[in-house]
Image: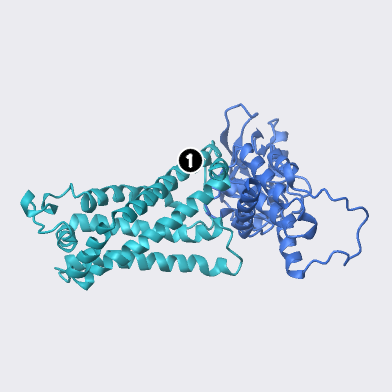
Chain colours: A cyan, B blue
Amino acid sequence: MNLLLKFWRSSIGKKWLVATTGLALLGFVIAHLAGNLQMFAGAEKINAYAEFLHANQKPLWVARIGLIACFVTHIVATLTLVRLNKAARPHSYALTKSVQAKISTKTMAFSGLTVLSFVVFHLLHYTLRVTDPRFKLTSEGGLLTSTHDVYQMVIMGFQNPLISGFYVLSIGLLSLHLSHGISSVFQTFGLESKRSAKWVPAAGRLLSAAILVGYASIPLAVLLGVLK
Amino acid sequence: MNLKLKVWRQKNSTAQGRLVDYEARNIPEDCSFLEMLDLVNEDLLARGEEPIAFDHDCREGICGMCSLTINGVPHGPSETTTCQLYMRKFKDGQTIYIEPFRAHAFPLLRDLTVNRSAFDRIQQAGGFISAHVGAAPDGNAILVPKTEADHAMEAAACIGCGACAAACPNASAMLFVGAKVTHLGSLPQGQPERERRVLSMVQQMDKEGFGNCSNYLECEAVCPAEIPATVIGQLNRDYASALIKDSV
């Protein structure tokens, strides 16, 4: 705890907290994608997966609390750093020109905050199921025959082009966020050498692109009628 | 060549500053940027106006004293110091914005001059070795592998001009601190104080009010000594390892 406080109190320590929690969240993004892609394996497969997750309440809640802690730390530490960064340049330049900063770097705050708003909506939509009355059991006036009928719920959800559009846009911004974040983790952990500085950003962009394609494939498949 | 200048004028640290338009006429292409300002100042003095204050010293690109943010880029459009920037890099009739290095930790003194003592204080916090070295030792008395010597030398090239902090959108000084930590931490003589050094220097850096690296890498692009941003990685790693060892 004492060590965590020491990390929190210094500039570089906070960067370590942002990077470590970011890496944990990336792990979740990849694991969640692997789970979601079971949509393509059919209703039985993904519904069994949902049932398996909910059958293990204890580990599920340990993971959820861990994720929430990472998410909150990631955001609070970043916002604290942003506040310090703004204070470090009270007078801005009349003319600013960036020499080599990438678009993903310059848009980290925008992409991060959009992803945050998306996560809130996504939880209300598919986890708490309060935004769509159809995601209730038939006995409660909804259209689901079982609470674990995730397949049917996802199909119904993504048939709405607005929801699918916001989903794909948010995943696009998440991918942009990660394309900067992944190489930044290497830099913060001090793992970047001159040689790796050449391939790490490219590998980060590739992984981010793969995450975008993976997640976007599901709403697109629903809209195109491949999944029904 | 003739140029239109927009120069930041400010009487002192507390006065309100503003960009003032000047015409620089008949400037030879082969004069340096600072010599161009000298010519403008001669003109101003002849008219009885206050000359523009700007920092300079060796005018050879090695002392780190000259500064200026030229058209939004510290040290302007060449990969050297402002004193080694020549007017042939500009086009006849071009408008040039000339502003001071801007950071909370570099308080403005007058016009284009800023106080960069914050870097001296960071250096004094730990950027040294306290071993008694005596006279120059024999060349091979302490063996240093060539790769590590090169690594240290690359970081040691930092002249402490402050362009990294001026270019960083967060006004972070981590390229400077990273260069010092990498330079001394890569050599055998720097090992005994390696952990104490990085902790003290980062503590002072935070105290001075510099921002934090977000990996924009603008610092690396404007550094006249071509210090690579990988030194920030080494700073991050050394700092975390020192903090953990200090707590255990």
The quadrant holding residue A2 is top right
Q: Nearer the viewer, residue B66 or B46?
A: B66
* Residue B37 in view of the camera: yes
The residue carrying mark 1 is A80
In this rendering, is residue A118 above or below B140?
A: above
* Residue B75 in view of the camera: no
Answer left or right for A4 relative to A221.
Answer: right
The quadrant holding residue A93 is top right
Q: Position of residue B126 (x, y in %)?
A: 74, 45
Residue at the spot x=35%, y=63% of the render? A31
Q: Position of residue A11 (x, y in %)?
A: 57, 44
Give the SS element for disc 1: helix
Q: Nearer the viewer, residue B199 or B112?
A: B199
Answer left or right for B174 relative to A62.
Answer: right
Q: Nearer the viewer, residue A212 or A106?
A: A212
**Total numbered labels:** 1
Residue at the spot x=18%, y=47% of the render? A130
Could you tell me the amino acid type at mark 1? Thr
Residue projecting furthest to the top: B14
Q: Nearer the viewer, residue A225 or B129?
A: B129
Which chain is mark 1 on? A
Q: Position of residue A185 (x, y in %)?
A: 51, 58
Q: Position of residue B180 (x, y in %)?
A: 71, 52
Q: Residues within 10 Å of mark 1 (few under 14, many from 20)?
A: few
Answer left or right for A150 relative to B95.
Answer: left
Residue at the spot x=22%, y=71% of the render? A40
